C-alpha cells in the first residue's frame, strides 16, 4: 500500500509511477497536473463522519424543512416535498420530479451507505469483490449527490418568498446545513485512490511496465488487457467506448433544449390572484429589482453562465479531440475538470422551482406553478452531466499523438 506503484492518469493517459504517500503532500500527474491525493486515509474519522452523516440525513428528512404562513393559512414542507411538488403538477414534469428525488435523496443516501460499508469492510479486512462493487457504486453516485446544491436552492427559495409571506426555517433545514458540512469533512477524510489500493493494490513499480497495459476508466488500475477489470469488475476498454459520439450527441441535445429552457416560463408566482409566468432571465431580473443582487449573481451564474460554459466547453473539447488539436493540452484538460467540478451547480434552479411549487400551495391567495421551462432546463442539466461522464479526456492527448510512446 505504501510502496510506489504504476498508474495511468485518467485525465491524460500517461503511464507513471505514483510515489508513496507523504502526509501533507498532494501527488500530481507531471503532464496534466491532475491530483492523486495525499494518499492518506483517515479511516476512523471517516467511519465516524459517515455515521454522523446518516443520522443527520434521517433528521433532515423527518423534520419540517420550511414553513410558510400567509393570511392565517400555513403550509410546511419536508426535504422530500420538492419531489411531490413537481409530480403533483401533471405527468409532464415527472422527469424533473425523478431528477430531484435522485439528487436530493437516492444518490446521497446510496453513496453514504455504500461508502460506510466499504470503510467498515476494509477495517475488518474484507477487501473482496463485494467491497469493490460497493466502492464502484459509491464512486458513480458522487456526481449525482447534490445536497450542497440543494441547500443553496433552499436558501434562494427562502429569499424569494420573503416579500410574499412569512417564512419559517424548520429544524430540517438546519440539519441539512450540518449534513453538508459533515459531508465536506468526509470527502476530506477519505482518499479515493488509497481506498482502491486497499481493496486491490495496483502493480508495484518493481514490475517492469508492459506496452499493452490498459488503465481502467472506473478505478484507474493498470492491467493486462481482458474482459473485465480485475479490481472493480467493470468492462475493460482502452478508452471510454464511443466517447466522442455519445458526448457529441448529448451536447447537441443540450443546445436544442437550451432554447425552450430559456423561452418557456420556469415558474408562475400567483399572489392575491395576480401573477405572471417568469423565465429564468425574468427570475434574475426580479431578484435584481428586489435588490437581492448577490442572489441574482448566483442564479445567473448557475442557470445561465454555467450551462452555456458547459455546452460550449464540451463542444470545443469534442472538436479538439476529433481534429487532433496539439496545443494547450494541459489547459484543455483543466477545462474538462472545471466542467466536471462546477457542472452540478446548474441544478440549483430546478431545486428552487421544486421547493417553491411544493411550499406555496394556498390557492388564489398565493401559489407557485411550475412551467415547461423547468422540464427543458432540467433536460439541459441532465444531458450535460451525462456528456461530461461519457467524454474521455485521454482522447485529447491520444489525438495529439502524445500517448504513442
Ligand atoms: Zn495526467
Ligand atoms: Zn477497474
Image (cartoon, grey):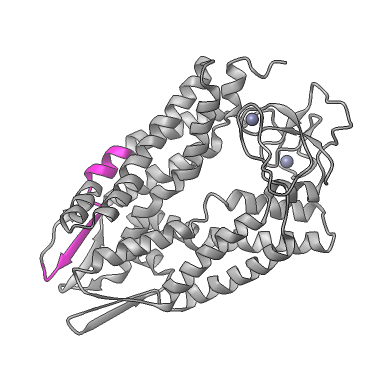
| Residue 224 visible in the current orientation | yes
The residue sitting at 73% across, 65% down in the picture is 44
Q: Position of residue 39 (x, y in %)?
A: 72, 47
Residue farthest along the right direction in this orientation: 206
| Residue 252 visible in the current orientation | no
The residue sitting at 41% across, 36% down in the picture is 310
Left or right: 82, with 239 as reference point: left
Residue farthest along the front direction in this orientation: 24
- Stretch in magenta: 258-273
Q: Position of residue 50 (x, y in %)?
A: 64, 66
Q: Position of residue 294 (x, y in %)?
A: 28, 54
The residue sitting at 58% across, 52% down in the picture is 141
The residue sitting at 70% across, 53% down in the picture is 135
Q: Is residue 48 above or below residue 184?
A: below
Q: Is residue 370 above or below residue 301?
A: below
Is residue 259 rendered magenta in the image? yes
Quadrant assignment, res 25: top right
Amino acid at each position: 500500500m505504501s510502496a510506489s506503484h504504476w498508474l495511468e492518469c485518467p485525465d491524460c493517459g500517461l503511464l507513471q509511477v505514483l510515489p508513496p504517500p507523504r502526509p501533507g503532500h498532494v501527488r500530481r500527474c507531471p503532464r496534466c497536473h491532475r491530483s492523486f491525493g495525499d494518499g492518506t486515509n483517515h479511516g476512523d474519522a471517516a467511519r465516524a463522519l459517515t455515521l454522523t452523516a446518516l443520522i443527520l440525513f434521517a433528521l433532515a428528512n423527518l423534520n419540517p424543512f420550511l414553513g410558510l404562513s400567509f393570511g392565517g393559512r400555513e403550509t410546511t414542507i419536508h426535504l422530500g416535498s420538492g419531489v411531490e411538488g413537481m409530480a403533483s403538477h401533471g405527468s409532464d414534469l415527472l422527469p424533473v420530479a425523478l431528477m430531484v428525488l435522485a439528487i436530493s435523496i437516492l444518490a446521497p443516501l446510496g453513496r453514504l451507505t455504500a461508502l460506510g460499508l466499504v470503510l467498515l469492510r476494509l477495517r475488518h479486512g474484507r477487501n473482496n469483490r463485494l467491497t469493490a462493487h460497493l466502492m464502484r457504486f459509491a464512486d458513480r453516485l458522487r456526481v449525482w449527490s447534490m445536497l450542497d446544491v440543494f441547500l443553496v436552492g433552499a436558501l434562494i427559495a427562502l429569499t424569494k418568498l420573503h416579500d410574499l409571506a412569512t417564512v419559517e426555517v424548520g429544524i430540517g433545514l438546519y440539519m441539512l446545513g450540518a449534513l453538508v458540512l459533515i459531508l465536506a469533512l468526509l470527502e476530506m477524510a477519505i482518499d479515493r485512490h488509497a481506498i482502491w489500493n486497499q481493496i486491490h493494490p495496483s502493480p508495484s513499480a518493481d514490475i517492469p511496465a508492459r506496452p499493452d497495459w490498459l488503465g481502467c476508466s472506473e478505478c484507474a488500475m493498470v492491467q493486462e488487457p481482458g474482459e473485465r477489470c480485475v479490481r472493480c469488475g467493470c468492462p475493460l476498454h482502452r478508452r471510454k467506448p464511443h466517447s466522442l459520439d455519445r458526448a457529441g450527441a448529448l451536447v447537441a441535445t443540450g443546445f436544442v433544449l437550451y432554447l425552450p429552457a430559456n423561452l418557456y416560463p420556469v415558474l408562475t408566482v400567483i399572489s392575491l390572484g395576480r401573477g405572471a409566468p417568469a423565465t429564468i432571465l425574468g427570475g434574475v431580473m426580479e431578484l435584481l429589482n428586489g435588490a437581492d443582487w448577490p442572489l441574482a449573481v448566483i442564479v445567473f451564474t448557475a442557470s445561465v453562465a454555467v450551462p452555456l460554459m458547459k455546452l460550449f466547453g464540451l463542444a470545443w473539447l469534442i472538436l479538439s479531440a476529433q481534429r487532433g488539436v496539439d496545443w494547450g493540452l494541459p489547459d484543455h484538460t483543466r477545462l474538462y475538470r472545471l466542467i466536471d467540478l462546477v457542472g452540478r451547480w446548474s441544478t440549483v434552479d430546478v431545486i428552487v422551482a421544486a421547493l417553491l411549487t411544493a411550499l406555496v400551495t394556498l390557492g388564489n391567495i398565493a401559489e407557485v406553478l411550475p412551467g415547461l421551462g423547468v422540464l427543458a432546463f432540467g433536460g439541459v442539466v441532465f444531458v450535460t452531466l451525462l456528456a461530461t461522464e461519457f467524454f474521455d479526456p485521454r482522447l485529447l492527448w491520444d489525438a495529439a499523438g502524445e500517448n504513442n510512446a
